[in-house]
Image (spheres, rainbow, N blue to C red):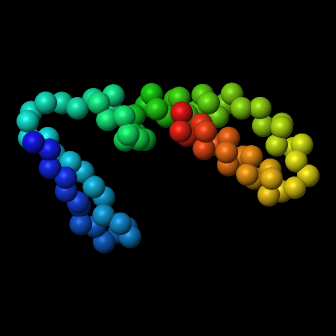
Amino acid sequence: MITGRNFWCDLADHLPNFFQNYSGNEHRSDDLPYVRLHSVKKNIEKFRTAVNNINWNKLSQYNNLNEAYSSFHKIITDCYNK
């Protein structure tokens, strides 16, 4: 049985969430495909690799700052979503 809970914390404007697994079975990150685990080293490295492989020179081709930022935002979001 899995039970969800919240930590009570006065330091943030939100409650951190966690879950407990009472069945004794371990959950791997592959079992939770819709959860983003930011602390897993392989996920951090995948993001770093994706960002390091970007050709940033194409952002200097924009004459409009808003278009350049939109392009930058899309690039970073795509890396994050991978």
Please name whichever residue, 70 or 13, is drawn nearer the observer in this view of the structure: 70
Question: With respect to residue 66, does 50 lie above or below?
Answer: above
Q: Position of residue 12 (x, y in %)?
A: 37, 67
Query: Taking 74 as reference, is 16 left or right?
Result: left
Q: In which quadrant is the C terminus drawn? A: top right
Q: Residue furthest front?
A: 34
Would you place residue 12 above or below residue 36 in this image? below
Residue at screen point 19% across, 56% down: 5
When the figure is inspected, residue 38 is found, relative to residue 42, above or below; the finding is below
Residue 31 location, quadrant: top left
- Which picture quadrant has residue 38? top left
Q: Position of residue 9 (x, y in %)?
A: 28, 67
Vertical relation: 42 (above or below) 6: above
Q: Quadrant of the N terminus?
A: top left
Q: Is residue 57 left or right of residue 69?
A: right
Q: Position of residue 80 (x, y in %)?
A: 55, 40
Query: Residue 29 at what x, y percent from top left?
Result: 32, 31
* Residue at horizontal 72 percent and vertical 46 percent from the top: 72
The one of 31 and 10 positioned closer to us in this rendering: 31
Residue at image x 24%, y 66%? Answer: 8
Q: Is residue 27 left or right of residue 62?
A: left
Say which residue appears at 49% left-offset and 34% top-offset.
Answer: 44
- Count of marks, rendered view: 0
